[in-house]
Image (spheres, grey):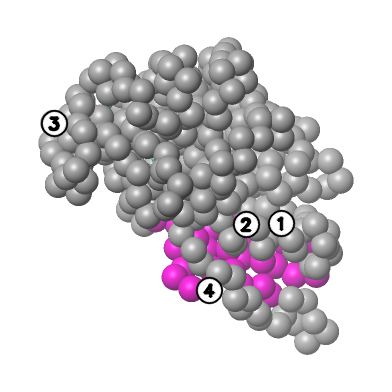
């Protein structure tokens, strides 16, 4: 058996355990150490991964030559510092979204990653999902004609002090749209509102306009008690609905016919999206192919989001 990549996970709150479960299930990786400054979250990690090494200080955790990759699932305002420290120590980095809300920081991390030839992965999970791959195929092959309107409703997520709802939830739609269209919006309108003291905008409506009469309408909020992750794409020849919360039939297609609409439920595989992302990370590290690594995806996404959120 080939050597496994040793992983240091920093941040074992809500998302860290979910990421860790998918990492440990991948035969290329071994969770070697876990760091969290909160002792009760570190105790939770000890219970799940009893044979790991545990740290409350990232600096100390990083100081180990056995670590190959650092996985960062701490709050956004720590990402730059931790990713920079890890890249300087010549570790690969997998950082949670958003990498940083600052373009200069994103550029610095990309330069460091290139200089030290260590990969910098960011977790935009949906672009690896089988549902989004299925949709991309429909769009590319024009199976339902031209895509006209993308509509997304994304509601309910934990309130966060260091971002707003556009950076936190909207980033998924911006990543999906960038992946599906390979384009940037040429015009946009944003309406964002904050309803909770001490936090930034927790509600937002965003309209995006692209070349060739393609538009996107995105509705986001953190406040709803009901979790909604629903995308509708209106095509010339029908409507595609992608409901991430559905168990099996996440995609439905209403195909236009002379009588009205015919409903189809295409069978799309439903591997956990994070599993597919972690597979991609492992496969990319093995190939060691820096020349083809797409740094522009995050750079472009950061620029778009900065533009959209400049008044919020
Ligand atoms: N990709 C996705 O779909 C997705 C989903 C949820 C969260 N996230 C991202 O994951 C990140 C973490 O979110 P979360 O909901 O798990 O937050 P959380 O607050 O639940 O967990 C963060 C953890 O980091 C620890 N931490 C904070 N500062 C630290 C430090 N200096 N050193 C060590 N540990 C520290 C905290 O104690 C906590 O356990 C965020 O960037 C968020 O945007 C991504």
The one nearer the camera, 182 or 238, is 182
Whether label 4 touches label 2, CB < 8 Å? no
Q: CA distance from mark 4 to mark 1?
A: 17 Å
Instruction: Describe the element under mark 4 as helix, strand or loop.
Output: loop
Q: CA distance from mark 4 to mark 2?
A: 13 Å
Q: Which residue is mark 2?
A: 132
Q: Which residues are magenta?
A: 227-254
Q: Does residue 122 appear in the picture of this structure? A: yes
Q: CA distance from mark 1 to mark 2?
A: 6 Å
Q: Which mark is residue 249?
A: 4
Residue 246 pos. (x, y %): 46, 68
Q: Does residue 304 appear in the picture of this structure? A: no
**Mark 1 or mark 4, which is nearer the start of the sequence?**
1
Q: Which mark is residue 39?
A: 3
Query: In the image, is the residue at mark 4 within 8 Å of ligand 1 by its beta carbon?
Result: no
Q: Which residue is mark 1?
A: 136
Instruction: Describe the element under mark 3 as helix, strand or loop.
Output: helix
Instruction: Describe the element under mark 1 as helix, strand or loop.
Output: helix
The one nearer the camera, 29 or 176, is 29
The residue lying at 47 percent from left, 29 percent from top is: 93
């Amino acid at each position: 058996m080939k050597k496994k990549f040793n992983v240091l996970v920093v941040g074992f709150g809500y998302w860290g355990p979910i990421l860790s479960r998918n990492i440990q299930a991948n035969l290329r990786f071994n969770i070697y150490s876990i760091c969290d400054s909160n002792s009760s979250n570190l105790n939770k990690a000890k219970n799940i991964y009893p044979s790991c090494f545990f740290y409350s200080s990232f600096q100390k955790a990083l100081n180990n030559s056995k670590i190959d990759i650092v996985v960062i699932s701490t709050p956004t305002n720590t990402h730059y510092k931790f990713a920079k420290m890890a890249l300087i120590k010549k570790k690969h980095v997998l950082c949670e979204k958003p990498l940083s809300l600052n373009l200069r920081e994103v550029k610095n991390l990309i330069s460091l990653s290139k200089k030290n030839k260590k990969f910098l992965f960011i977790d935009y999970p949906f672009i690896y999902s089988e549902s989004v791959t299925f949709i991309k195929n429909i769009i590319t092959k024009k199976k339902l004609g031209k895509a006209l309107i993308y509509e997304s409703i994304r509601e309910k997520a934990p309130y966060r002090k260091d971002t707003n709802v556009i950076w936190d939830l909207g980033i998924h739609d911006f990543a999906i749209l960038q992946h599906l269209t390979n384009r940037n919006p040429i015009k946009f309108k944003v309406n964002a509102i904050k309803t909770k003291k001490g936090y930034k905008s927790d509600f937002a409506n965003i309209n995006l306009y692209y070349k060739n009469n393609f538009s996107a309408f995105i509705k986001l909020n953190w406040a709803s008690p009901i979790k909604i992750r629903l995308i509708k794409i209106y095509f010339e020849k029908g409507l595609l609905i992608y409901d991430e919360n559905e168990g099996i039939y996440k995609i439905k297609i209403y195909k236009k016919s002379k009588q009205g609409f015919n409903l189809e439920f295409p069978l799309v595989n439903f591997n956990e999206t994070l599993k597919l992302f972690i597979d991609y990370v492992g496969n990319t590290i093995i190939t060691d192919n820096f020349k083809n690594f797409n740094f522009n995806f995050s750079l472009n996404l950061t620029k778009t989001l900065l533009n959209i959120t400049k008044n919020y």
